[in-house]
C-alpha cells in the first residue's frame, strides 16, 4: 500500500481548491484543501462504555433530567410527582375540571357496566367478576397512572386470551373454583410481570409486538370472538370452549337443533341496533354519546323485554342471580404451588404483555392528541400494581380499553378523576342494583361483545401495510391466520417470529450499491437511483447499508467481489475506459462490526491487493474505527487507507496518481 | 413548513460559491451552487422487486455469470465443470501433480486410520465404522468437491455430538443394533439436510454460527471430550455415557477402584509423546510430518507392547476383533418409521450443520491460502451427497477435518486425488491388515483423541474477542459453559440465541448522534468524536445509525426528542447563542424503514412543528424514500424538507433565513 504515506508533507502542492460558502461554514482559508484525518472516538474504559450502553438501553429518555440542579425539597416534590402523577395535576384541580370529569365518568360507567359483564363471560368467568374488575383497578390507576384519558377496566383481547388459554387445560364448567383461582393467579402474575418490566425499565419488550403483528392479531381475535358469540346469539347451550375457527364453526352447525328462533330474532335486532349506533358515532364523532349510551339502553330494554316475556319465551338464556356487595378479598385464592402453576404463569405473562401493549398504545394515542407525554415504563408500573391489587380483590386482568377511552376523551375527560367517578358508579351498582341484572339475556352480552370487537378489524391499516411494506403485510397475515386457525398464543408467537425473521433477513442480506459522483458537488450517490450521478474513472465506490456481522460477513464478501468483477467486465466491454485502480468502501452506514466482519475486511483487502487494486475505507464510524484499531487491522492500512469522506478519498488518491503516474 | 417552497426560482440569487476540484469531478460551471433534488428510486413492480430480493437472498454470487453469452456446447461443458469440479482440473492433471498427491495421500492415510478408529469410539460406534467412513466418502468428495485440500473423513465434533445425542436416549451397550441403525439414519438425514441446504441455496444458515460461538463451542467440546477420554487413559470400565462435566468428573472419581496403574503409565507416556510431536510441528511447520506420523507410530508401538505384555498385564483394554472386508451395504439399516425417527432426524440436522460448518470453514481457509474460491452452496451439496452415499455403505457422518486437511496441505496436496490415494490405503487396510489392530489398546485411542481435540481450544482467539468485542466474548463464554455444563445441543442453542440477541439489541438500541460541521469542508461528523467539528448555529443535526423498525421506533422517537431538549437546555445555558430553529435528520445510515418507523417520522415532525422547529430529512436512501412516498408522509414535507446531503440542507435553509429573516 503506502502509496499515500507522505500525504501530509505534500498537502501544499494540491492544485484543487474548494471554496465553502462563508456565511454558513466559517472556514479558515488554509483549511480549504486539507485532507482530514479519520480519528478515533474518545477513549473510554470498558466500564464507562458499559455504563453508557446500559443507560441507553434502560434510560433512553433520561427520566431524571428534571432532578438535576434542584434543591432537595424540590427533588422530593419532583420525586413524589414522578411516582404519583396525581401530585402533578392535583394542586391545580378546579371545579370546572371536576364537572368535565363527572360527565365523562358517568358516560364511561354506562359503557363499563355492560362491557364488564360481557368481557367476564368472554374469559369464562362469572359476570360479577367483570364488575369487580371495573371497581378496584380504576381507583389504583387514578393515583399511579400518567395518562389522563385512559378508561381502565377489563378489555376484550386480554379476556379472550385468558379464557382460551385457561380453558384449554381446566374446564370452567367442571372445576369452576380451580378456574377462578387460576384466573386470579394469572392476574397476579400478569401484574408482577408488568410491574417488573416497568421497574427494570424493560419496556422495549412490548416494542417487539409490531403494528403489523397487532393489526393482524386483533383482527383475527375479533373474528374468532365474534364467531364464538354465535353461541349467545343463536341460543346454543352446548358449545366448544376452544378459540379456533374450525371447532367454533363445527359447534355452530352441529348444534342446529339447539338454535332458538326467539333468541335469534331478538339478538340480531339488538346487534343491528348497536352496530347502527356505532356507525352513527363513527360518522359524526360529536354524537359519540349515542354509541356510548346504546349498550346500557340495550341492556335495560332487553332485560325488560325478557322479564315481561319470561313465561311465554322461557328458552332465552339469562345471566341469573348476581351477588350483591363489594369485591370480596381473594388473596387466599392465589395459587402458588401445584401442577397448574405453570399454566397460570404462562397465561399471566401473555395476557400481561397484551394488556400492556393495548394500555400503553391507547394512552400514547390520546396523549398525542392532547400534547402530553406518557412514560411507558411508569405506565407499566401503574398497570402492574393495579393488576396485583386487583388479583387480591377478585378482579381479573385489566388495562386501558380503547373503546371506553375514546368515549372518555370525547365526553371531555380532563384527568383520571373520571375513572374515580366511574368506580363510584360501579360501586353503587354493586351495592344496590345487582338484582336488576337477573333477567339480562345472554344474547345482549354477545351483541355488546361483537359491537366492541368489530372495531378491532382495521382493514384499512392492513391495506396500507400492503401498499407500503409487503413483508409487514405478510407478518400481519401470519398473525391473523395463526390466531384464527391455530391458537391465540401460537398465532402471536408466529407473528413475532416473522417480525424478528424480517430483521434478521435484513441483516443477513443488506443493501449494497455502487456510488457515483453527482456532478457539481461532493455528493456521492447510488448510481442506480440518480441519473445525475456518474462513475469516477478508475474508481469503484461501494457502499454497505448495514452493520457487518457474522450473519452477513460471508455474503458481503462475495457481493463486494461480484461488484468488482462486474465493474471489470464493464470496463472490458467498453474499450478505452481507464482500468480500475482503486476500490473505495463507504462505511457511513456500517454502524457496527464484529469479529467476523473485521475478518471480512481483511480478507477483502488481501483479495483486492492480489488483483493489484488499492482498497480504502471512507468514513468508518467511531464504533467500527475502534474495533478495527483494536484488532490491528489498521496496520496494513497504516492509517492511510482511511478517509473521512468518499470525496476526500477520491480527491486525494487521484491527485497522488497525477503526481506519480 | 413551505419556507423553502420556491427554492428553484431563487437559485440564481445565492451568494455562495462552491468550486470543485476540476480534475476529479468535471463539474459544469452553472451547477456549482445548485441544490440537488432527492429523487425516487427507479420504479419497479412488486414482482421485479421480489425477483431482485430473491436473487440477492439465493444467488448473491451470481453463480451462472460464466454461462452468459456462451455457445451451447461451451455451456454444456461449463455446466459439467460446475457440477463436477473434477472436469475442471482433470484435463490439466500431470504426473508431477500425481506425485504430490500420492505423497500427501499416504501421509493423511497414516493419520486417518488411527483417527478413524478413535472417532468412531467417540461416537460410541464399533471402531470398524470409522475405517469404513474413511473409505467411501472421500471417493465421492473427490468427484463433487471444489476444495483441493480438504481431507475427508470422520471428525471429532460431529462424532462427539452424534454419540452424546444418540446415547441420551438409546444405550449402545444394550441395544447396539438399534444404535447403529440410528447412527446410519442420522447420517442419512444429515446428508439430505446438507444437500438440500446447498440445492435450495440456503447456505447462509450456517452463517448464524458465528466465529465467537464456534470458538466457545469447540473449546467446550474439546474439554469435555478430553475429560471423557480419562475412561481410556485411566482404564475405567464403568463410565457415564453423558457428555456433561459433572457426570464425567463424578464417574472418574467414583470409580477409583477401577483405575489401572499400568494403563495410566502407558497411556500418559504416549499422550506426552503425541503432544510433544504436535508441539514440534506447530513450532516448525516444515516438520509437519512428525506429528502426522506420530499417531500411526504410537498405534504400532503400543499394539506391539500390549501384544508382548498380554500375559503379564491382562487388565489393559484392547480393541479386539475387527472384521476384514469392504464396507457392507447398510441401506436396509435405515430407519424411516418408529418412535426413534425424531431423534435420528434431530441428530442428523445438528451433526449435519456442525459438520458443514467445519467442512466449509476448513475448505475456505485453505482456498484462501492458495487463492482459489470455494463455493459454499456447492460444497454443501458435495458433503451432503457424500453423507447420503455414506449412510448406505456403513459410514457415519463425515466432513473435511481440520487437522488432516492441514497435514494434507503441508504435505503438498494439489488436488482431491490425495483423497483417492487415502481411500485406496484404507481399502488395503480393510482388506488385509485388520487382524493387526486386535491388540491395539484403548488408551492409545484416547491419547490420539485428546491430541486431536486439544488444538480446538483456541484461547488466543477468545482473548482477541475480549479485546475487540465484549459481547462476542460473552457469546463465546455462553457456548463454552453451555456445552460443558448443560449439553452439547443446548449449549449451541444458547450461543446462537445470544448471537441473535446481540443483533436484536443493536437494532433495538441503535446509535444516534449529533453532527457538527468540520470547518473547511462540507463534511458533517459526530461532535463527540471530532474536535474539529463544530455546531452550526440554529441547527441541530442528528443522525441515526440503523434502520427504523417497530423494535426501535419508540426508542428513537424518545431519543430524538431528548437530543432536542438537551440542545435547548444547552442554548439556554449559554446566553447569546442563537435559538434553535431547525432539526436536520441525517438518514444516510437508515437503510430501511417499516410502517412503525414511518409513524415515528410523522410523529417527530408533528412534535417539532409544535415547538416551531423546522424538521428536514437529509439523504433518505432509495428504499426509505419509496416507503415515505407510498405512505403519503411526504405530502406535509411537500418534497421540500428533503435534501440530498446535510451540507445542502444547511446551506439552503440558512440562505433562505437570510433572505426572509
Image (cartoon, coloured by chain):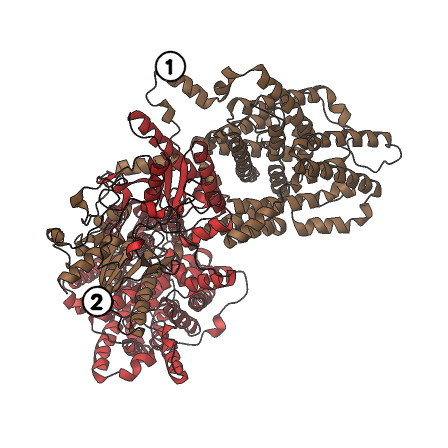
Chain colours: A brown, B red
Given residues A370 and A330, the one toward you in this image is A370
Using the rendered view, name the quadrant where residue B541 is placed: top left
Q: Which residue is mark 2?
A: A610
Q: Is residue B596 left or right of residue A95?
A: left
> Can you say which quadrant of the picture contains the C terminus of chain B?
top left
In front here: A1 or A263? A1
As drawn, B42 above or below A373: below
Judged left or right of residue B657, residue A42 is left
- Percent coordinates x, y for residue A44 in the rendering: 24, 38
Please give left or right for residue B511 compared with residue A28 in the image. Answer: right
Residue behind mark 1: A73
Q: Secondary structure at mark 2?
A: helix
- Which of the two residues, A444 or A339, is positioned nearer the viewer here? A444
Q: Residue furthest toward the right?
A: A312
Q: Residue at x 69, y 39 (%)?
A: A279
Residue A490 at what x, y percent from top left?
A: 56, 48
Q: Are marks 2 and 1 in contact (CB under 8 Å)?
A: no
Q: Which sits in the foreground, A353 or A35?
A: A35
* Residue B246 in view: no
Amino acid at each position: 500500500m503506502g502509496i499515500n504515506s507522505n500525504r501530509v508533507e505534500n498537502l501544499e502542492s494540491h492544485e484543487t481548491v474548494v471554496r465553502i460558502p462563508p456565511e454558513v461554514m466559517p472556514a479558515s482559508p488554509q483549511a480549504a484543501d486539507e485532507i482530514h484525518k479519520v480519528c478515533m472516538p474518545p477513549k473510554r474504559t470498558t466500564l464507562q462504555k458499559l455504563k453508557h450502553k446500559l443507560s441507553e438501553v434502560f434510560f433512553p429518555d433520561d427520566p431524571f433530567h428534571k432532578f438535576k440542579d434542584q434543591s432537595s425539597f424540590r427533588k422530593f416534590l419532583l420525586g413524589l410527582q414522578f411516582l404519583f402523577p396525581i401530585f402533578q395535576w392535583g394542586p391545580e384541580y378546579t371545579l370546572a375540571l371536576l364537572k368535565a370529569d363527572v360527565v365523562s365518568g358517568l358516560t364511561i360507567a354506562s359503557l363499563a357496566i355492560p362491557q364488564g359483564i360481557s368481557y367476564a363471560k368472554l374469559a369464562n368467568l362469572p359476570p360479577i367478576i367483570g364488575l369487580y374488575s371495573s371497581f378496584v383497578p380504576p381507583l389504583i390507576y387514578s393515583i399511579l397512572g400518567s395518562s389522563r384519558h385512559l378508561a381502565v377496566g377489563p378489555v376484550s383481547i386480554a379476556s379472550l386470551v385468558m379464557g382460551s388459554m385457561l380453558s384449554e387445560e381446566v374446564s370452567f364448567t367442571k372445576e369452576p373454583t380451580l378456574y377462578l383461582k387460576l384466573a386470579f393467579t394469572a392476574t397476579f402474575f400478569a401484574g408482577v410481570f408488568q410491574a417488573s418490566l416497568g421497574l427494570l425499565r424493560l419496556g422495549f419488550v412490548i416494542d417487539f409486538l409490531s403494528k403489523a403483528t397487532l393489526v393482524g392479531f386483533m383482527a383475527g381475535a375479533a373474528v374468532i370472538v365474534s364467531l364464538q358469540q354465535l353461541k349467545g346469539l343463536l341460543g346454543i347451550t352446548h358449545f366448544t370452549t376452544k378459540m379456533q375457527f374450525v371447532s367454533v364453526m363445527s359447534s355452530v352447525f352441529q348444534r342446529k337443533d339447539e338454535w332458538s328462533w326467539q333468541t335469534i330474532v331478538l339478538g340480531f335486532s339488538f346487534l343491528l341496533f348497536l352496530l347502527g349506533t356505532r356507525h352513527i358515532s363513527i360518522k359524526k364523532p360529536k354524537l359519540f354519546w349515542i354509541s356510548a349510551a346504546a349498550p346500557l339502553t340495550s341492556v335495560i330494554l332487553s332485560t325488560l323485554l325478557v322479564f315481561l316475556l319470561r313465561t311465554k319465551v322461557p328458552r332465552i338464556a339469562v345471566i341469573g342471580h348476581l351477588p350483591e356487595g363489594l369485591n370480596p378479598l381473594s388473596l387466599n385464592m392465589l395459587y402458588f404451588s401445584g401442577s397448574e402453576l405453570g399454566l397460570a404463569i404462562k397465561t399471566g405473562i401473555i395476557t400481561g404483555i397484551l394488556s400492556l401493549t393495548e394500555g400503553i398504545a391507547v394512552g400514547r394515542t390520546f396523549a398525542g392528541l392532547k400534547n402530553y407525554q406518557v412514560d411507558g415504563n411508569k405506565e407499566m408500573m401503574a398497570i402492574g400494581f393495579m393488576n396485583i391489587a386487583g388479583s387480591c380483590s377478585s378482579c381479573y386482568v385489566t388495562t386501558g380499553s380503547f373503546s371506553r377511552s375514546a368515549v372518555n376523551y370525547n365526553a371531555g375527560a380532563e384527568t383520571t378523576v373520571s375513572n374515580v367517578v366511574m368506580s363510584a358508579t360501579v360501586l353503587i351498582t354493586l351495592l344496590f342494583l345487582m338484582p336488576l341484572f337477573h333477567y339480562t339475556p345472554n344474547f345482549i352480552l354477545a351483541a355488546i361483545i361483537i359491537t366492541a370487537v368489530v372495531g378491532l378489524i382495521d382493514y384499512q391499516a392492513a391495506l396500507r401495510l400492503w401498499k407500503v411494506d409487503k413483508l409487514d403485510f405478510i407478518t400481519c397475515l401470519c398473525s391473523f391466520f395463526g390466531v384464527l386457525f391455530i391458537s391465540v398464543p401460537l398465532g402471536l408467537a408466529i407473528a413475532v417470529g416473522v417480525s424478528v425473521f424480517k430483521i434478521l433477513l435484513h441483516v443477513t442480506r443488506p443493501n449494497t450499491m455502487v456510488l457515483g459522483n453527482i456532478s457539481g458537488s461532493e455528493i456521492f450517490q447510488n448510481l442506480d437511483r440518480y441519473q445525475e450521478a456518474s462513475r469516477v474513472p478508475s474508481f469503484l465506490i461501494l457502499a454497505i447499508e448495514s452493520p457487518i456481522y457474522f450473519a452477513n460477513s460471508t455474503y458481503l464478501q462475495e457481493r463486494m467481489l461480484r461488484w468488482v468483477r462486474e465493474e471489470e467486465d464493464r470496463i472490458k466491454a467498453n474499450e478505452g475506459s481507464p482500468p480500475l485502480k482503486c476500490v473505495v468502501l463507504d462505511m457511513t452506514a456500517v454502524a457496527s462490526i464484529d469479529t467476523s466482519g473485521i475478518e471480512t475486511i481483511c480478507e477483502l483487502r488481501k483479495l483486492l491487493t492480489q488483483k493489484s487494486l488499492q482498497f480504502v475505507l471512507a468514513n468508518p464510524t467511531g464504533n467500527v474505527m475502534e474495533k478495527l484499531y483494536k484488532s490491528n487491522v489498521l496496520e496494513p492500512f497504516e492509517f492511510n487507507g482511511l478517509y473521512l469522506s468518499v470525496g476526500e478519498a477520491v480527491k486525494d488518491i487521484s491527485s497522488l496518481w497525477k503526481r506519480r503516474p
